[in-house]
Amino acid sequence: MRRDVQLALPEEACAKVYATTGYQQSVQNLARTSLTSDNVFGNDGGTHQLATMSGSVSRGYTASLTVAV
């Protein structure tokens, strides 16, 4: 059986990336949508899909999520 997993990213990491050149529209989208109001993550606010992030804007980020099988 195949199960798709949606990955949610922490707002803090998104805000840091969106503060860089080229992401002006993404800043507006982030301000309008939260994980609790999102149609994919709204059921639980992304609790079970929220990745742990490491890295930085300049070096790149790595996202990690443990998924029960």
Image (spheres, rainbow, N blue to C red):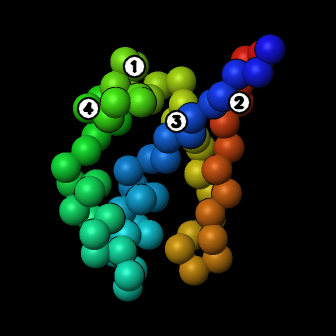
SS state under label 4: loop
Percent x, y for residue 35?
34, 35
**Mark 3: few/some/many CA within 10 Å (<14, 14-19, 20+):** many
Image mark for residue 37: 4
The amino acid sitting under disc 3 is Leu
Q: Residue furthest bottom?
A: 21
Q: Position of residue 68 (x, y in %)?
A: 73, 18
Amino acid tagged 4 = Ser
In the image, taking residue 3 as reference, residue 27 lies left or right, namely left
Q: For the residue carrying disc 2, how many other residues have a C-alpha within 10 Å: few (<14), some (14-19), or many (20+)?
A: few
Query: Looking at the image, which residue sits at the far front?
Result: 1
| Residue depicted at 37% across the width and 18% down the height | 43
Q: Are marks 2 and 4 in contact (CB under 8 Å)?
A: no
Which residue position holds label 1?
Answer: 44
Q: Which residue is mark 2?
A: 66
Residue position marked by numbered label 3 in the rendering: 50
Q: Earlier in the sequence, mark 3 or mark 4?
A: 4
Q: Residue at x 45, y 58 (%)?
A: 13
Residue at image point 47% right, 25% down: 47
Q: Label 4, label 1: how many angstroms apart (C-alpha)?
A: 10 Å
In the shown orientation, is residue 57 left or right of residue 19?
right
Q: Earlier in the sequence, mark 1 or mark 2?
A: 1
Image height of 33 relative to 30, above or below: above
Q: Quadrant of the C terminus?
A: top right
- Please report whichever mark, 4 or 1, sits nearer to the chain's N-terminal start: 4
Residue at image location 42% in from the left, 59% down from the top: 14
